[in-house]
Amino acid sequence: MNSFQPTERTQVKRLPKRGVYDRAAIYKILDEAFLCHVGFVVDGQPYVIPTGYARAEDTLYIHGSAASRMLRALSGGVAVSVTVTLVDGLVLARSAFHHSMNYRSVMVFGTATPVEDAAGKMRALHAFTEHVMPGRWEEVRGPSEQELKATLVLALPLSEASAKVRVGPPVDEDEDYALPVWAGVLPLQLTAQEPVADPRLPAGVAVPDYVRKYKRG
């Protein structure tokens, strides 16, 4: 299926023209961002916790310590919402009221389940590593059996999701367009800077090309 079917939870109601349900567009946003915010409720108390994630095909993975309260709660079948946001620019209008941002955001709803088998965990950890730094997995030491046991991996099926996107210039009131105030968009982009070597790095170990030429998006 090329698009997600909007549900009561994923249908964009505020400014519905910004709603995006195309699967490829939603996956592109998920693959570009680093950080998600995981929302859930335990004993009537809501929590929203930032964490890393990775996507592999139609599944979103989150992971952490097996002692994590968030992961243990979610592994018990608690309903979860996951949000991801990319800010692409500051939209500067002629009036304070109409200032905005250009952004791409995704919301995912569902129930996560633990990945129990070692092979499944390894595939998920491979996805995490490659999501952050493509090419890294092949160079580093893989997780040990003890490290796998200490790690809890949850899988969230990408079956209920939508995106909301704003692009373009500011939208002012008609009478404000004549004001002598600069208006427009200040684009923003995540840019890598010069790599900083670990102080304990042995002499002669060069910066890999995938680090030196790193680019997101």
Image (cartoon, rainbow, N blue to C red):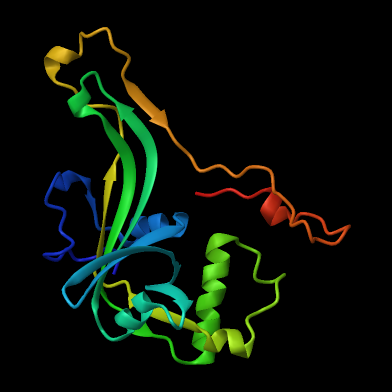
Work out whether 76 lies above or below 81: below
The residue under the point 51% across, 43% down is: 190
User: Between residues 82 and 119, which one lies in front from this camera angle?
Assistant: 82
Which residue lies most toward the bottom here?
Answer: 117
Where's residue 77, x and y in %?
Answer: 26, 84
Residue 53 shows in this picture: yes
* Quadrant of residue 9 within the rendered picture: bottom left
* Quadrant of residue 138 within the rendered picture: bottom right
Give the tally of numbered discs. 0
Residue 155 shows in this picture: no
* Quadrant of residue 35 within the rendered picture: bottom left
The residue under the point 46% across, 54% down is: 32
User: Between residues 203 and 119, which one lies in front from this camera angle?
Assistant: 203
User: Between residues 210 and 21, which one lies in front from this camera angle?
Assistant: 210
The residue under the point 62% across, 81% down is: 143
7 sits left or right of 180 in the view: left
137 sits left or right of 75 in the view: right
147 sits left or right of 151 in the view: right
Work out whether 184 lies above or below 147: above
The residue under the point 41% across, 56% down is: 28
Where's residue 141, x and y in %?
Answer: 70, 76
Where's residue 139, x and y in %?
Answer: 72, 70
Work out whether 76 lies above or below 177: below
For the N terminus, the image quarter is bottom left
Which residue lies most toward the right here?
Answer: 204
Where's residue 54, x and y in %?
Answer: 46, 68
